[in-house]
Amino acid sequence: MKIIRIVLALAGLAALGFGASLFVDYAAPAWPDSVKTVLWIGGGPIVNDAIFAPVAGVLGLLLSRVLPTPWRAPVQVGAVLTAVLGFIAFPLLWRTYGVFTKPGLHDGNTWLGLGLSLAVVWAVVIGAGVTRMVLAHRKPRGPVRETVRA
């Protein structure tokens, strides 16, 4: 198992080095514009770590404290999927044509797609929550057995 981890780590470092060499080839000729590229590459993780992760953590903690047990997991999954879909759709919602120049990626109605995706996610969340509530109330509750240790 240790050998596999070492091989995977070396492959990851090789891919990182190759990516860095490609970025240097791209950024060196266009130095003033490469600052924008560095901000664009680094901005996603910074925004995620500064905004999305703390909000998701606090929201998950609040949901786990407030919601009844059968509803906790479906609502938390729905909240995570909502955040992920919003994060993915953000570039296309922010600018009319987003960051894509390929045909077919920018000509769709992003608001409609995001709305339909979120409607499906939350319909499944509600269905799962109701199912879990029904199953929780159907379980026969037998006598509790206590074990006595000698």
Image: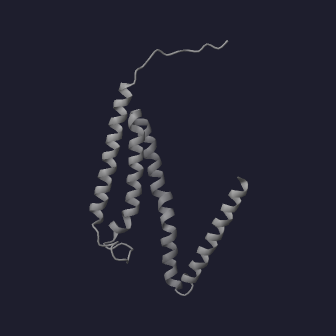
Q: How many marks?
A: 0
- Looking at the picture, tell me which residue is in the foreground, 1 or 150: 1
Q: Which residue: 32% across, 36% down?
A: 130
Vertical relation: 150 (above or below) 20: above
Task: Residue 120 in the image: state x and y as whole percent.
Answer: 31, 51
The residue furthest bottom is 29
Task: Residue 45 in the image: state x and y as whole percent.
Answer: 51, 63
Vertical relation: 116 (above or below) 27: above
Vertical relation: 140 (above or below) 28: above
Task: Locate residue 148 relative to residue 59 in the image: left or right.
Answer: right
Vertical relation: 77 (above or below) 108: above
The residue furthest right is 3
Task: Residue 28 in the image: state x and y as whole percent.
Answer: 57, 85
Q: Which residue: 58% across, 74% down?
A: 19
Quadrant placement of the C terminus? top right
Q: Which residue: 45% across, 55% down?
A: 52
Q: Which residue: 32% across, 47% down?
A: 122
The quarter holding residue 93 reads bottom left
- The image's colour scheme reads one colour
Task: Residue 40 in the image: state x and y as whole percent.
Answer: 48, 72
Task: Locate residue 92 relative to residue 7 in the image: left or right.
Answer: left
